[in-house]
Image (spheres, rainbow, N blue to C red):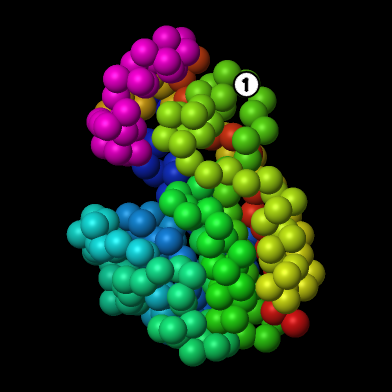
Amino acid sequence: MIRKPEVLERKLHLMLINLVSLIGIREGMQVLDVGCGQGTFTVCLAERVGETGKVAAVDITDEYLKGMNKTLEKYGVKHRVKFVKTDASELSAIFAPQSFDAVVSYRFIEELIQPEKLPKIIAEMAKLVRQNGKVALIELSTKTRNIAEQNLIKLHKEIGEDYFPATKEILEHMKSAGLAKIYIETIQPEIWFSSAVFLKGAGGQDAIWTEFKGRIMKELWPSIKQYGVKYPSINMLLGQKP
């Protein structure tokens, strides 16, 4: 079990680097990151594409831009990333068709405020990827194996009221968007952290869950204190532009 916030941050970064590698991101690629948020996935994409590649990072708000820039500067890749503020359902109004070698998102769907836009968003992502390029949607699985994993899912699904559509539904939207060779790759991260890290660590209560503090302490804290918090399986849904 991870007991230091800096260790958790390092483990999460290594996990994301692994996900980027599994997608097939390589040196020199042009990549679009949809729903970039604070840029934790963006920085891994930028590391992977190298000096000859570029990453366009899209989000509907720029409220996390300062934090993202700080992260990009920390890893020395800010010059490889361009931020664009736009709605993910209107990507083709900003970018030309087939502009990217890969179009990806990490835990973007769960943050959707308007879930009804999901089919349009996936269709827009498919428009922008080049022939034989990949679209990758990476999301947490709600199938948990222990109480520590249940704690994380309850935090997001029940308290945070995040959106977790059925995997089958996402796959159907990818097929409707014209993607081919669609498949799921499941990753089992071994990231299990203590209640103390949850309170003070990166992504913990004091960092991003302040508005839910009362509910967390009442509904989840006894379980978190006893069992900690663990990442469940991660589903990577991939499709290729024919």
Would you say residue 74 is visible in this rendering?
no
- Please tell me which residue is depicted at 37% across the width and 21% down the height of the picture: 216
Name the residue carrying label 1: 146
- Please tell me which residue is depicted at 37% across the width and 42% down the height of the picture: 9
On screen, residue 200 versus residue 29, left or right, reads: left
Q: Where residue 135 sits: x, y (%)?
A: 62, 69
Residue sitting nearer the eye, 87 or 71: 87
- Please tell me which residue is depicted at 35% across the width and 20% down the height of the picture: 215
Q: Where residue 231 sits: x, y (%)?
A: 53, 34
Q: Does residue 39 lie above or below 53 as drawn?
A: above
Which residue range is magenta in the image?
A: 201-226
Q: Does residue 208 lie above or below 100 as drawn?
A: above
- Please tell me which residue is depicted at 74% across the width and 51% down the height of the picture: 168
In the rendered image, residue 139 lying in the magenta stretch gets the answer no
Q: Where residue 13 sits: x, y (%)?
A: 43, 49
Would you say residue 134 is visible in this rendering?
yes
> Looking at the magenta stretch, what is its main secondary structure?
helix
Residue sitting nearer the eye, 157 or 186: 157
